[in-house]
Amino acid sequence: MIIGNGRIITNDSNNAFIENGAVLIKDNIIEDIGYFEALKKTFPKEEIIDVKGKVIMPGMICTHSHIYSAYARGMDVSKPQRNFCEILKNLWWNLDKKLTLEDVKLNALTTYIESIQNGVTTLIDHHSGPNSVTGSLFTIAEAAKEIGMRTSLCYEVSDRDGEDIVLKEIKENINFIKRIQKDDDGDMIKGLFGLHASFTLTNKTLYRVKEAMEGIYDGYHIHIAEGIEDQYDSLKKYGRRVIERLYDFGILGERTIAVHGVHINHREIEILKETNTNVVHNPESNMNNAVGAPPVVAMIKQGIRVGLGTDAYTNDMFESMKVANILQSHQLCDPTFGFNETQIMQFKNNPEILKKYFKRDLGVLKKGAYADIITVDYEPWTPINKDNWFGHVLFGMTGRLVNDTIINGKFIMKNRKFLSVDVKEVYAKSRERAKKIWTLM
């Protein structure tokens, strides 16, 4: 199959930009990239998909989200949300307790659908639902397989719901990781070990986690110092800052994702660098929760691999990029920061993070990479080329301009229409369930 007659952004090491370009897909792999007419002549028997001048670019990557939060859109919360802890207790920890496995499946379907509509082809999720723990990750994986989404999953272990739930949460993570190590659906589904945050994890639980993971895997997914309360708790109980405490337990490393990092100091940044730990920035969520802005510029300067996620505030990575850019400019009172760092997070570091888990390159159009590709119905009114394409992506594009989404060499959405699921049917079921959930809040 040849996808062509468009402006190609490769995001490869050559920073290539091709007018009237095309991509040749063989099975689920990119076989070649070049000019449209040349590829058609070289491969005359291939199916031709003419995108009629649209932008052809790598699928977007979200390195942190929460599928379980899907019902919150439009939901009224009567309990106080005056600070970060009240937001957690009265909104998210109240909602996740209400979820059944049916809800988990619907939440996964709706999140994946909207993500794909916005051009996201790989999503790393961090799940919670203490009354539907067992089988929850497998249920989300079923939804991903049904839709055709590339994803990585984990369950956030936390002491907040009691010891019996902790044991179930540890078991769910371990069982899922073991299953995925045997069958990852052709490199489409991966597993990490999820942990909520230091302030909801006792030493006893962390020792249990490390024992359970011994000889199995070394990849974790955890929130770090999102709110200042996380640091206060760690210092008061353990005499260690959050990153120091996680380092002591061997949680950090090149396959670990540490999310947020709003309230970390220079020594903690050094530890993240020394351990080669991945960090993920979620700008809109941090602003919405009023927890502050993380030292993204400082971390990137230190060589830390900082990626970009959404924390489920949105399913549109174009939107997340826009806010990431202006948040750093605003926080540092310096308009020279934000732009380059945002490009690095989304188009360099997010693909680098995925390399830790997936066998082939993602987030780039080059020979040998997985064919995760989107087309964007964007007609620029100023010149676009290899030197300024990111400015067009950041300031001109939105997720709703995505016309086609190809994952693993297959059209999942074509001309804005889903080919794998009935979107209206899924959304109707979700609305009905959401009504019932809201009455329980």
Image (spheres, helix red, strand yellow):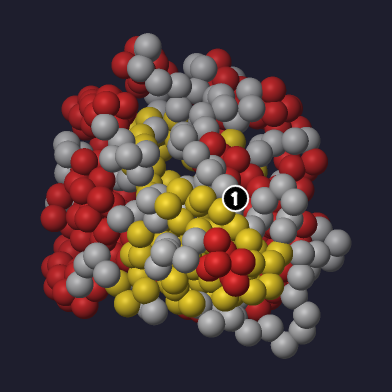
Q: In the image, is 222 to the left or to the right of 383?
A: left
Q: What element carries label 1?
A: loop
Q: Farthest residue toward the bottom?
A: 381
Identity of the residue drawn at 28% across and 40% down = 185
Indicate whether 171 appears above or below 432: above
**Residue 399 can be seen in this image:** no
Q: Identify the amino acid type marked 1.
A: Lys
How far across and down, in percent of the image, does residue 4 sit? 54, 71
**Location of residue 194 with respect to 372 vertically, above or below:** above
Location of residue 392 in the rendering, given as x and y in whole percent from the top left corner: 70, 74
Residue ID at (30%, 55%): 148
Q: Nearer the viewer, residue 211 or 178?
A: 178
Q: Where is residue 267 in the image (x, y as percent from the top left)?
A: 73, 27
* Residue toward you, 250 or 305: 305
Picture quarter with the C terminus? bottom left
Q: Which residue is drawn at 59% across and 36% down?
A: 278
In terms of image quadrants, where is residue 35?
A: bottom right
Which image quadrant for residue 284?
bottom right
Mark 1 sits on what residue? 366
